[in-house]
Image: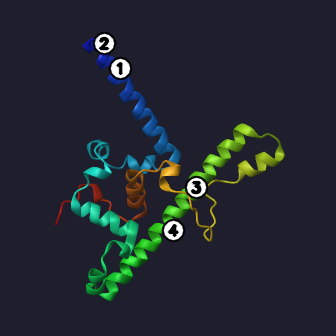
Amino acid sequence: MFNSQQEKLIKDSIEKTQEALYERRLNYYGILSEYQLHPKDLVQNLSYRKLNPYQHFLFKRVLHGLNMYSVEEKQKLHWDKKRRITRVWKRAQNELNIWKQIICNKKVNDYFRRTFTGPMAEYIISIPPEETLHDFTNTMTLKDLGITYEDVILRFMQKGLLPRTFLTLKAA
């Protein structure tokens, strides 16, 4: 098999490749600048599975709204809190829809750029990917687009749906 020095070289090579792929993915989604606002040690440890219960609760409430509560819990909530949760949830769904459209537009433009030539293809590609339709609902799943919950957390932090200090929040 491999000796310890060869194993170390292989592991280092794999880590460098994964870091490059991760940075390329963040650049592609357009969130690298936001990602770098946080200290390295916090960002490197961002894992959906390692969120504390309070962070998990906040994220799920933004992502799922009132659907995360049972019927009894919904009845106990104050009407104003229900309204606030619903408003934030709708805004989060709208932001996710727009983000998914932008990613799809970038992928389609890249495909057209590699596949077609001519003035018609150039015209289609010239439309910026950030132009989205607000009345169109993108039905692709996050998994189909390669978006992880960590990416969604960073996007929600960027858009103000989760607090900027979300990664440092402790259980109350």
Q: Residues within 10 Å of mark 1 (few under 14, many from 20)?
A: few
Q: CA distance from mark 1 to mark 4?
A: 43 Å
Vertical relation: 63 (above or below) 142: below
Q: CA distance from mark 4 to mark 2?
A: 51 Å
Q: Quadrant of the N terminus?
A: top left
Tell me where residue 88 appears, x and y as whole percent: 41, 73
Q: Amino acid at mark 2?
A: Phe
Mark nearer the N terminus (2 vs 3): 2
Labelled disc at residue 2 = 2
Residue in view at x 34 percent, y 65 percent: 60
Contact flag, marks 1 and 3 (Cβ < 8 Å):
no
Closer to the camera: disc 1 or disc 4?
A: 1
Closer to the camera: disc 1 or disc 3?
A: 1
- The residue singled out by tag 1 in the image is 10
Q: CA distance from mark 2 to mark 1?
A: 10 Å
Q: CA distance from mark 2 to mark 3?
A: 45 Å
Labelled disc at residue 69 = none
Q: Amino acid at mark 4?
A: Asn
Vertical relation: 64 (above or below) 28: below
Residue in view at x 22 percent, y 61 percent: 53
Residue in view at x 38 percent, y 83 percent: 83
Q: Residues within 10 Å of mark 4 (few under 14, many from 20)?
A: some
